[in-house]
Image: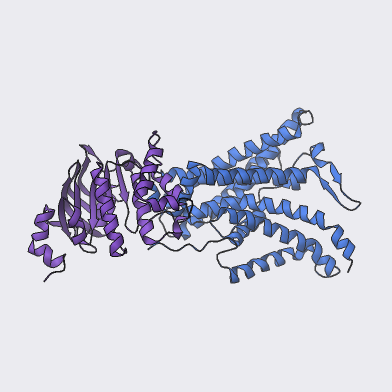
Chain colours: A purple, B blue
Amino acid sequence: MLEVENLHVFYGEIHALKGVTLTVGKGEIVTLLGNNGAGKTTALKTLSGLLPARAGQVRLEGRTLLKVPPHEVVMRGIAHVPEGRRIFNRLTVLENLEMGAYARADAGIEQDLERVFTTFPRLKERRAQVAGTLSGGEQQMLAIGRALMAAPRILLLDEPSMGLAPILVEQILETIQGINRQGTTILLVEQNAAMALSIAHRGYVLETGTIVLSGSAGDLRENPEVRRAYLGES
Amino acid sequence: MDLPLLISIFPQVLTDGLILGFMYALIALGYTMVYGVLEFINFAHSEIFVTGAFVGVEILLALKARGTLDLLSPFLVLIVLLVAAMAVSGLLAVTVERVAYRPLRGKPRLIPFISAIGVSFFLQDAIRLFESIWRNSFNLVYPTMDLFNQRFTLTETIDISVKSVVVIVAALLMLWALHLLVNRTKIGKAMRAVAEDQATASLMGINVNRMISLTFLIGGAMGGAAGVLFGIQYSLINPYTGFIPGLKAFTAAVLGGIGNIPGAMVGGLVLGLLEAFAASYFSLLTHGAFGAEYKDIFAFSVLILILIFRPKGLLGEVVRERA
């Protein structure tokens, strides 16, 4: 569904991605693992058009995504939940969700809003509240809910577990799996490898801008390198 | 101290203050909306305002020359003036952004600011050149409309002109329309989203550049409308008229909390009322020792005090910075 080929991206003078190749198949949960500064966020930002690529190719269902401005990438069916949630603090919960559906004009918006509220009943309770007053976990729910309002075919998630208590992480994971079961393809970027591999089908490991390992989630969990460097085992 | 006199002039001073305040509020919106989106002071906004005043005077003079001004309803004329001035000032603001600010976006802040100062001088002298050739004078006077100059006599000492009421009502209607646009429509919500976080707004499918143009269009249109109202109220305009009201309106925007739309409205009203009350009551209370010319000292002292004790302005919100 999504194919990334030999992607090179510069962040100012820094060569942040040095020829990344990966694919995400329809209906999969694919995770991109790596430490801080490995280039995970850069990769997602390039996919959604926020950063330009120096070389390489990105295709969604065969059509190139490079040089498509971010506001048009959404219309192609990609929704991006950015790192640090980035909800609109001064807008209400409901207005945030409406912004998620900004690019749409179809009749399904109301229905999707109900679906988001069913998935996250908390958001329904707080729909009229200014989003800046939500707790961290609620903000993450809102960020994911907002992306779902775009009715994406593929959802890019950047560190959804960041800064959340373990019980909330568990809940977010279940939600991601639920979204996937309803037919949305997912590319999940995580530092928390154990968490990501527990729900992913496949994974890639990124180190300083290069993919160093890839395989099924099971294989990666068993890989001694991954166990030592990312799962905290000695 | 003559207490009955102080009380008896109160409605008059209040009206003057409201007129001035609404004028500042309309102009302040242009500063605050642009700042909210780009964190940039559009120094040329005072010339966008003056352009509106000149569009108004040109239409009025053209109607007068044809002898049709007295035949038309003044309210119809006012609507035509407002629509035309809003269109011209709005489009001018959009053009200025496109030509002089957008190419400099992402550069150090001082650079677009200097560009704005340049645009300000350019527009002042462009208007001066045009009017000097076209009318042989760049000091123009708004032709009067009889109905607007009639006065309601409230008491022996108080009377209020029709045009004062018209200016206040027109300003209120525009502020209300802007409020609905920004808070109730999808496009207004998108403008607020862009003001808060451009990159994330673009991920929602919002075309950020288009929203920035729209912000300049609306801010410019409000400034143009203020220009027409200024001309109707105070009559005399020239290409440099915008400087002082522009500076005051910018002050009002800061007073209310720069970047905050209701703040600009409140800040404008507060500053206008302060000025009007200082101008009349100061000299009365001090038996003329402090004349009306000290009103600006009073108004700006209040600004300084508010900024010391509430640096974010009256309505400036303390939003938690995102992680």
Q: Position of residue A78 (x, y in %)?
A: 29, 43
Residue B82, above or below B6: above
Q: Position of residue A157 (x, y in %)?
A: 28, 52
Q: Position of residue A207 (x, y in %)?
A: 17, 61
- Position of the N terminus of chain B, as image quadrant, is bottom right
Task: Compare residues B257 and A33 and report the one nearer the observer.
Answer: A33
Task: Compare residues A93 and A122 and report the one nearer the observer.
Answer: A122
Task: Compare residues A222 and A154 and report the one nearer the observer.
Answer: A222
Residue A158, above or below A3: below
- Position of the C terminus of chain B, as image quadrant, is bottom left
Question: Is residue A53 visible in this depiction of the protein?
Answer: no
Is B197 on the left-hand or right-hand side of B291? Answer: left
Question: Is residue B35 visible in this depiction of the protein?
Answer: yes
Q: Residue at x 70, y 44 (%)?
A: B229
In this rendering, the count of numbered labels is 0
Q: Residue at x 80, y 42 (%)?
A: B162
Quarter of image, res B7: bottom right
Q: Residue at x 43, y 44 (%)?
A: A98
Q: Position of residue A107 (x, y in %)?
A: 40, 33
Task: Compare residues B77 and A107 and report the one nearer the observer.
Answer: A107
